[in-house]
Image (cartoon, rainbow, N blue to C red):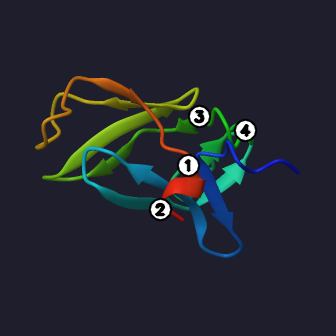
């Protein structure tokens, strides 16, 4: 499988990793492909190039974002300079 354009990394037993441009670090969320399991796992559309996660990813007091179609949509309550902005995800090849 071609991996050079992947923006997320899936690790068995650990979840899905992606680079957060606003925090300048990786974030990890436990995922399941398909619909979300309430209270346990984030939903993941299975696309490693243009991923979508549900619900939003929230690190209180630091970062709150939505991952949608390969874009990081930063919510207004982020504490960094990307609050309220949308940026493309970085290829995993660049940071993993």
Please state the horizontal and vertical placement of residue 32, each as a whole percent of the image.
69, 53
Q: Name the residue tied to disc 4.
A: 47
47 with respect to 15 (left or right): right
The residue at the point 72 percent across, 38 percent down is 47
Mark carried by residue 52: 3
Q: Earlier in the sequence, mark 3 or mark 4?
A: 4
SS at circle 2 = strand
Q: How many angstroms separate mark 4 from mark 2 (CA)? A: 16 Å
Other residues around mark 4 within 10 Å, as few (<14) / some (14–19) / many (≥20): some
SS at circle 4 = loop
**Marks 3 and 1: CB-CB under 8 Å?**
no
**Marks 3 and 4: CB-CB under 8 Å?**
yes
Please state the horizontal and vertical placement of residue 5, each as a whole percent of the image.
67, 42
Report the quarter where the C terminus lies: bottom right
65 with respect to 77 (left or right): right
Q: Name the residue tied to disc 1.
A: 38
Please state the horizontal and vertical placement of residue 14, each as a whole percent of the image.
60, 73
Q: How many angstroms separate mark 3 from mark 1 (CA)? A: 16 Å
59 with respect to 6 (left or right): left
**Marks 1 and 4: CB-CB under 8 Å?**
no
**Marks 4 and 2: CB-CB under 8 Å?**
no
Q: Earlier in the sequence, mark 1 or mark 4?
A: 1
Q: Name the residue tied to disc 2.
A: 28
The residue at the point 74 percent across, 42 percent down is 46
The residue at the point 20 percent across, 33 percent down is 82
Q: How many angstroms separate mark 2 from mark 3 (CA)? A: 14 Å
């Amino acid at each position: 499988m071609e991996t050079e354009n992947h923006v997320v990394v899936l690790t068995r037993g650990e979840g899905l990793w992606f680079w957060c441009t606003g925090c300048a670090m990786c974030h990890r969320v436990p995922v399941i492909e398909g619909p979300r399991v309430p209270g346990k796992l984030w939903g993941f559309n299975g696309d490693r190039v243009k991923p979508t996660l549900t619900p939003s990813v929230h690190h209180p007091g630091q970062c709150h974002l939505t991952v949608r179609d390969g874009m990081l949509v930063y919510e207004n309550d982020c504490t960094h300079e990307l609050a309220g902005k949308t940026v493309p995800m970085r290829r995993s090849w660049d940071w993993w």
